[in-house]
Image (tube, rainbow, N blue to C red):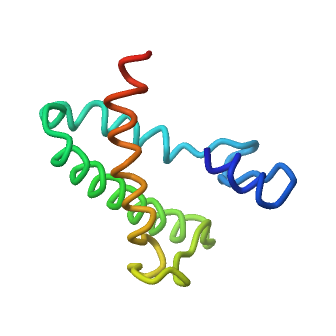
Amino acid sequence: MEVVIVSTKKKKITARGFLIGPWCPIYGFGALFITLLLRKYYEDPLVLFIMSFLLGTILEYVTSYLMEKLFHARWWDYSDHKFHINGRVSLTTSLGFGTLGLLLVYIFNPFF
């Protein structure tokens, strides 16, 4: 999804991950974690949103930190966002994780 959005904005195909091609494994791991770890919250959309928000934020922060230490590079920087923590996570993206958690659980998972 991120590859499509960025490529559309730049009007050319843009690889966003550290792998060859348009692969961003952080989203796959996030979806797996939400699907496997948050089952007990499926009946309460508000709690599911909050837990997806927190899980996605923690995953993104830890991933950013580890990738910076391992590869000596930063793949994203939210320092220009209004509410961010060390440029690694931002309120905007965290709200997106919460929303995507709801979409995953209530729309995509039942479909698949």
The residue sitting at 70% across, 46% down in the picture is 4
The residue sitting at 20% across, 41% down in the picture is 45
Q: If the image is split into quadrants, where does the N terminus sit? A: top right
Residue 10 vs 51, above or below: the answer is below
Residue 48 vs 92, above or below: the answer is above
The residue sitting at 45% across, 69% down in the picture is 65
Apparent side of residue 92 relative to residue 9 in the rendered image (left or right) = left
Q: If the image is split into quadrants, where does the C terminus sit? A: top left
Residue 76 vs 8, above or below: the answer is below
Residue 22 % position (x, y)? 71, 43
Residue 33 % position (x, y)? 32, 39
Residue 21 % position (x, y)? 75, 42
Instruction: Count how many numbered circles sit on residues in the image.
Output: 0
Nearer-the-camera pick, 65 or 99 = 99
Residue 44 % position (x, y)? 14, 38
Residue farthest toward the right in the current orientation of the protein:
12
The residue sitting at 49% across, 44% down in the picture is 27
